[in-house]
Image (cartoon, rainbow, N blue to C red):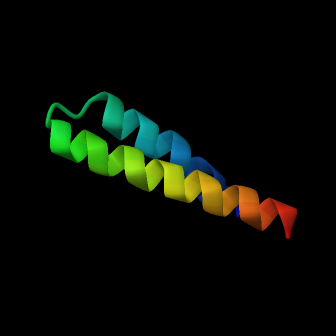
């Protein structure tokens, strides 16, 4: 579980240093999905 909770931090840092706008959008979308999944998992 520890690795899963660190994934959003890693994605946010990658997005921060990514210059390509389409890649940033993709990372933003993926980050939202991961955070949503983690919230659902915590509620379970």
Please indicate whether residue 12 sits to the left or right of residue 6 in the image. Answer: left
Q: Residue furthest left?
A: 20
Residue 12 placement (x, y as % from top left): 44, 37
Point 53% across, 40% down: residue: 9
Residue 33 rendering spot, x and y as whole percentages:
52, 58
- Quadrant of residue 36 within the rendered picture: bottom right
34 sits to left or right of 29: right
Q: How many marks?
A: 0
> Where does the image place residue 13, in percent across and percent down from the top left?
40, 34
Q: Is residue 43 above or below residue 31?
A: below
Name the quarter where the N terminus is drawn.
bottom right
Report the residue at 85% width, 70% height from top: 44
Q: Looking at the image, which is closer to me, 14 or 35?
A: 35
Q: Residue 38, located in which quarter of the rendered image?
A: bottom right
The picture places residue 17, in percent across and down from the top left corner, at: 27, 29
Report the front residue among 3 and 20.
20
Q: Is residue 36 left or right of residue 12?
A: right
Residue at 42 percent of width and 55 percent of height: 30
């Amino acid at each position: 579980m520890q690795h899963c909770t660190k994934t959003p931090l890693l994605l946010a840092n990658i997005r921060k240093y990514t210059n390509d706008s389409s890649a940033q959008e993709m990372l933003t979308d993926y980050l939202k999905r991961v955070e949503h999944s983690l919230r659902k998992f915590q509620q379970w």
